[in-house]
Amino acid sequence: MTDGTTAAGLAEEAAPQVTPEVTDEATAEEETPATRESRLARLEREGDIAADYLEGLLDIADLDGDIDMDVEGDRASVSIIADDDTSVSRSLQKLVGRDGEVLEALQELTRLAVHRETGERSRLMLDIAGFRARRREELAEIGRKAAEEARSTGKPVRLDPMTPFERKVVHDAVKAVGLTSESEGEEPQRRVVVVPA
Amino acid sequence: MLDEALEHLVKGIVENPDEVQVHTKNLRRGRVLEVRVHPDDLGKVIGRSGRTARALRTVVGALGGRGVRVDLVDVDQIR
């Protein structure tokens, strides 16, 4: 392999990062049944690799939890769930961490494990004990409130800086109530602006 | 358990999993988990701006290794 063996070498390789949040949906519509099938197969394989990696960790750490796999749009989605048992849910919280810090770290490692097997960069989403699902609901609510405000005041509403994932959820929520939104600023200060109709 | 968990996490992301070794050292200053990988894999476990190394430390910390140091070295480095 020609991968750089130093951190500096890797930094060069992964230079500019444009957030593809707007193009996410558009590509899915133009595909033929055959490409759709191979995309699904590829994402399902990502989920399988991720599940093996995470299951191994749960075993070693003696943590209970079931693994759920799905494909959402153009991403594989893997969740470690607690199976309605509150003590299990509590013990999984340590894999979520404060503000999802541990969850992000585990997602990062899981994507690397998938990349090792497939050779392709993975955009897999990991959720643990429903953390991301809850966060998604909060963000959608933020998006809807901002849309309401933009509509009633007739002025753009600028939200706090968010991660690409968070902005995507907000954009979708704004779009669902019939308004438009855009992103402005540079990462990590990039934020959603909701535009009045 | 911590060393085993760390070994599993690292083995899953490197090109040469058979060459991954994790040693636990109990120093006076505290516990150190020393991860040895194939020289070609060192960049991979460190990651862009140390991102992967940070992720490994975060997960080890969460599994009960708060205050445990994680050192990443390649197998050719002399102790």
Image: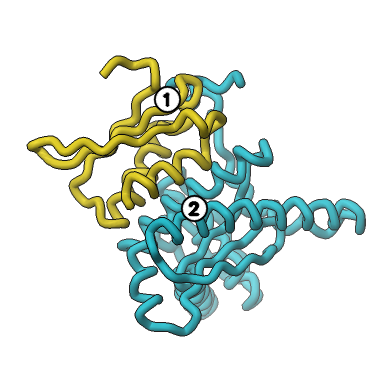
Chain colours: A cyan, B yellow
Which amino acid, mark 2?
Answer: Gln
Is residue A99 visible in the rendered structure shown here? no
Q: Chain of mark 2?
A: A
Residue at the spot of label 2: A107
Asked where in the image residue A47 lies, by quadrant, the reply is: bottom right
Residue at figure coordinates x 46%, y 76% from the top left: A82
Check residue B35 in the rendering and tell me which mark sits there, or answer none.
none
The residue sitting at 30% across, 35% down in the picture is B23
Q: Quadrant of the N terminus of chain A?
A: top right
Image quadrant assignment for residue A93: bottom left
Give coordinates of residue A70: x percent, y percent: 66, 66
Q: What is the crowding at mark 2: few (fewer than 14 residues within 10 Å), some, or many (at least 20)?
A: many
Quadrant location, the C terminus of chain A: bottom right
| A154 sits left or right of B25 in the view | right
Count how many numbered circles sit on residues in the image. 2
Secondary structure, mark 1, is helix
Examine the image and state in which quarter residue A160 appears: bottom left
Q: Which mark is residue A7?
A: 1
- Label 1 resides on the chain identified as A
